[in-house]
Image (cartoon, rainbow, N blue to C red):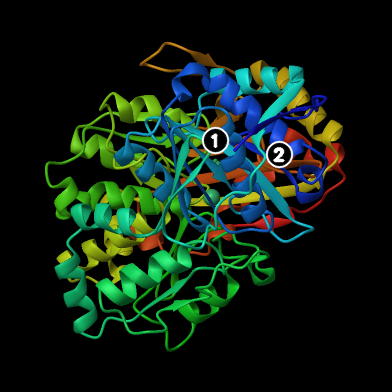
């Protein structure tokens, strides 16, 4: 067994974004590209690696297996004591987070580009998670980037990595490589949080559900948990086999990309409950019969009802949402008398709040919901918590949503995305908007009056760090809001996201078409930001 030291030159673009290093597959296929970045991660972790456990897995997309083998060979050559890898190189992101925590690992490497398309023309990604199971914070990703930019070589085992399909332990150099079932540990954790017997009772009573895994990593998890352990009929989970190109699906669980699920749930023979997850299993989409539940509403409903599930029976210590997420959960927190934190976009900002026990539940408009059980958002967990709440209340999912609105009011919400716009034009729009902020309060747009306008900055209450320029917020006096920010996860040009919402307390006005209710705010947002003038786009490319 021998270690080879391979001289390389650094790549200048290995800067992790919102969620790890995410690029086109072709970029990752450049010589030594994967190797350099993995070495930079391990160098950044440093001495703590020696003899320690490292968790490894990915969402099964194109390049997953090759990259996993490379990580194993490099990790073994860098003194890692034990590498815990999911069979076939697979682990959903929440399962990886859970495994890091339960195995006492120093951290984990997750191979995923989340909800971005896969296949040879699609995207790939590498992300480092810390010992708490959560994404590396900015000072660590910054250090990884600096190391990657200065790298002159990497260490790798000459020998091939072990067969990732065979469960069990082998050695590579000094390292133990353990191939584990990717589902077992995760399913055991879920059993502690929600009442499996109660949910099984729901299915025994004829409850029908559709779970669309979008040919991505949650297929095996959903089949094991929903169909085998909870007794949902075979075929409840569709598109259950993870494929390198996700079967051509865009594995992003929203009404646009999960259109087959939407069609079924809006149809005459809709099942009682519909759900989907994304490429790496951390996002979720919830659909009641005839009614799409926005992630913002889902977070609020889970916050209001979580105490029914065994894992949350003692109530919540607090909740958090990302800034562009609607304020529906704030209303629940107020009623519960617990704090509600507003963080920048990106799951990593919840880490300190969860670690310090300040919050139990958190979520984002981008289809992420989670709790203190792991340090990632967790798609299947959200689905199971919903099921347990339905089982406990005996309510239909759509009735539960309407009852929630009747009690708290409805936050009408939509997101308009302008994808693949020219990066300089998008920056120009944001700069111009920021320069105008001070002049906006008091001005009128259509029937709306700007009450306040700012560029969101977050001061972390735990470590005091300040993260500035996280998106522009325009508050209207009419209890409405528009938020503008540029996506941090795109790989082509820039994506402008415009988040629009309006609060409606009157139950008689809770069943109106969303885009219609929000039309005045949409028009105001377009005018305030000069979207067409800057980007040349009269209409968004995706509306969710
Ligand atoms: C990833 C992160 C989320 C974040 C989302 C935002 O999914 O894990 O925490 O909300 O990206 O993406 P965006 O494209 O809006 O920057
Ligand atoms: Zn994801």
> Residue 391: x, y in percent?
19, 69
Q: Which quadrant of the figure contains the N terminus? A: top right
Looking at the image, residue 349 sits to the left or right of residue 538; the answer is left
Q: Residues within 10 Å of mark 1 (few under 14, many from 20)?
A: many
Identify the residue at image location x=53%, y=75%.
239
Residue lying furthest front:
1
Judge: label 2 CB < 8 Å from ligand 2.
no
Q: Quadrant of the C terminus?
A: bottom right
The x and y percentages for residue 334 are 25, 35
User: What residue is rendered at 66% in x and 72% in y?
Assistant: 247
**Residue at the bottom extreme?**
269
Residue 356 place in picture, x, y as percent:
28, 23
Residue name at image x 42 percent, y 88 percent: 269
Front-most of 368 and 189?
189
Separation of marks 2 and 1 at Cα, in angstroms: 15 Å
| Of the two numbered discs 2 and 1 in the rendering, the one whose residue sits closer to the viewer | 1
Residue, disc 2: 34
Decide if residue 520 is in sight here. Answer: no
The percent position of residue 457, horizontal first and vertical second, equals 53, 19
Q: Nearer the viewer, residue 56 or 416?
A: 56
Q: Which residue is mark 1?
A: 76
Pointer 2 or 1: first along the chain: 2
């Amino acid at each position: 067994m021998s270690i080879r030291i391979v001289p390389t030159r650094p790549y200048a673009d290995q800067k992790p974004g919102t969620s790890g290093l995410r690029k086109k597959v072709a970029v990752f296929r450049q010589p030594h590209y994967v190797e350099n970045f993995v070495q930079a991660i391990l160098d950044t972790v440093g001495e703590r690696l020696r003899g320690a456990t490292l968790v490894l897995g990915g969402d099964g997309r194109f390049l997953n297996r090759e990259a996993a083998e490379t990580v194993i060979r490099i990790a073994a050559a860098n003194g890692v004591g034990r590498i815990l890898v999911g069979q076939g190189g697979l682990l959903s992101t929440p399962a990886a987070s859970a495994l890091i925590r339960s195995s006492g690992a120093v951290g984990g490497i997750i191979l995923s580009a989340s909800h971005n398309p896969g296949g040879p023309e699609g995207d790939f990604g590498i992300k480092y998670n810390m010992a708490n199971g959560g994404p590396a914070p900015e000072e660590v990703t910054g250090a990884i980037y600096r190391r990657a930019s200065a790298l002159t070589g990497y260490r790798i085992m000459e020998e091939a990595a072990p067969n990732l399909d065979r469960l069990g332990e082998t050695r590579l150099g000094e390292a133990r490589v353990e191939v584990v079932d990717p589902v077992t540990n995760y399913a055991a954790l879920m059993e502690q949080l929600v009442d499996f017997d109660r949910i099984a009772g729901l299915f025994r009573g004829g409850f029908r559900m559709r779970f669309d895994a979008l040919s991505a990593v949650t297929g095996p998890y959903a089949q094991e948990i929903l169909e085998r352990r909870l007794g949902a009929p075979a075929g409840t989970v569709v598109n259950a086999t993870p494929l390198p190109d996700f079967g051509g699906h865009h594995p992003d669980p929203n009404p646009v990309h999960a259109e087959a699920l939407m069609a079924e749930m809006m149809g005459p023979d809709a099942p009682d409950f519909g759900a989907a997850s994304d490429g790496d299993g951390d996002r979720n989409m919830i659909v009641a019969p005839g009614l799409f539940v926005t992630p913002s509403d889902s977070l609020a409903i889970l916050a209001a009802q979580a105490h029914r599930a065994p894992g949350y029976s003692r109530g919540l210590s607090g909740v958090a949402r990302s800034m562009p997420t609607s304020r529906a959960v704030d209303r629940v927190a107020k009623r519960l008398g617990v704090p509600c934190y507003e963080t920048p976009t990106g799951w990593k900002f919840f880490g300190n709040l969860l670690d310090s026990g300040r919050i139990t539940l958190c979520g984002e408009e981008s289809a992420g919901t989670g709790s203190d059980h792991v340090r990632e958002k967790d798609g299947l967990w959200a689905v199971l918590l919903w099921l347990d709440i339905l089982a406990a209340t005996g309510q239909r999912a759509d009735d539960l949503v309407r009852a929630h609105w009747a009690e708290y009011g409805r936050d009408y919400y939509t997101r308009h995305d302008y994808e693949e716009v020219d990066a300089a034009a998008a920056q120009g729009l944001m700069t111009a908007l920021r320069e105008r902020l001070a002049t906006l309060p008091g001005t009128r747009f259509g029937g709306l009056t700007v009450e306040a306008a700012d560029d969101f900055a977050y001061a972390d209450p735990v470590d005091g760090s300040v993260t500035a320029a996280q998106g522009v917020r325009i508050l209207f006096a009419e209890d409405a809001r528009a938020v503008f920010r540029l996506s941090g996860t795109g790989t082509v040009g820039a994506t402008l996201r415009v988040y629009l919402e309006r609060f409606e307390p009157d139950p008689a006005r809770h069943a109106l078409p969303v885009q219609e209710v929000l039309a005045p705010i949409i028009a105001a947002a377009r005018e305030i930001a000069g979207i067409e003038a800057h980007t040349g786009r009269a209409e968004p490319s995706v509306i969710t």
